[in-house]
Image (cartoon, grey):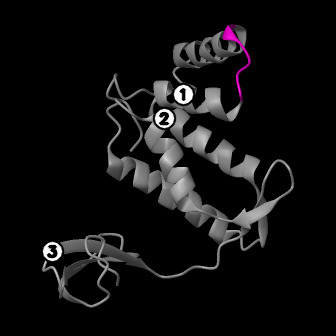
Amino acid sequence: MKCPFCGHVEDKVVDSRLRREGDAIRRRRECLSCRRRFTTHERVEDILPMVIKKDNRREPFDRKKIMDGMVRACEKRSVSMDTIEAIVDRIERKFQDRMEKEIRSEEIGEEVMRALHETDDVAYVRFASVYRSFKDLNDFMNELEEILKLREQGKTKTVDNKEAVP
């Protein structure tokens, strides 16, 4: 493993721990050159589907893109990283379980929006505004009105009200 500090390629593993879910191993490593420590995560390399983008390009499924989008949407909200990781794990597992070779990027976006809608309304609107490319304030207001209708019917949850789905 290449040291992120000095670039040396030899290190030793100081500590290894299995994640609670059992799907990854966290390793603490020490560089044999500069003696600084760093962390790596090892996961089983799953066969993930190719993602068909809106312009019909194909690229490998990338959980980091989902994670980054959710982290941005949840910025300054009380949604924990554990919750975000659990959602990303669930989405990734869902598409793996389908055992399809290709999936449309729209399906991934809709899954993220569904999960954020159940978790935090503000994060949902943030993500939706980028994902759905809101053109103007009317698009934004229409989405907010829909959320308010659902909230009145008791079908939506928010972190602020301490009713969020983990």
Q: Amino acid at mark 2?
A: Ala
Residue 36: assigned label: 3
Q: How many marks?
A: 3
**Mark 2 or 3 closer to N-term?**
3
**Residues shaded magenta:** 133-137
Are there few (<14), some (14-19), or many (20+) residues within 10 Å of tag 2? many
Residue 62 coordinates in the image, percent (x, y): 59, 62
Q: Are marks 1 and 2 in contact (CB under 8 Å)?
A: yes
Q: Secondary structure at mark 1?
A: helix
The mark closer to the camera, 1 or 3, is 3
Q: Within the magenta stretch, is there residue 135?
A: yes
Q: Residue at x 12, y 80 (%)?
A: 35
Residue 109: assigned label: none
Q: Are marks 1 and 3 in contact (CB under 8 Å)?
A: no
Q: Which residue is mark 2?
A: 73
Disc 2/disc 3 C-alpha distance (Å): 33 Å
Residue 126: assigned label: 1
Q: Are marks 2 and 3 in contact (CB under 8 Å)?
A: no
Residue 150 coordinates in the image, percent (x, y): 59, 19
Asked whether 106 or 145 is in front, the reply is: 106
Residue 33 is left or right of residue 112, and the answer is left
Asked whether 35 or 152 is in front, the reply is: 35
Image quarter (top left, top right, bottom left or bottom right) of the C terminus: top left
**Mark 1 or 3 closer to N-term?**
3
Residue 122 is left or right of residue 36, and the answer is right
Q: Within the magenta stretch, is there residue 136?
A: yes
Q: Amino acid at mark 3?
A: Arg
Are there few (<14), some (14-19), or many (20+) residues within 10 Å of tag 1? some
- Residue reaching furthest to the right: 56
Q: Residue at x 59, y 44 (%)?
A: 112
Q: Secondary structure at mark 3?
A: loop
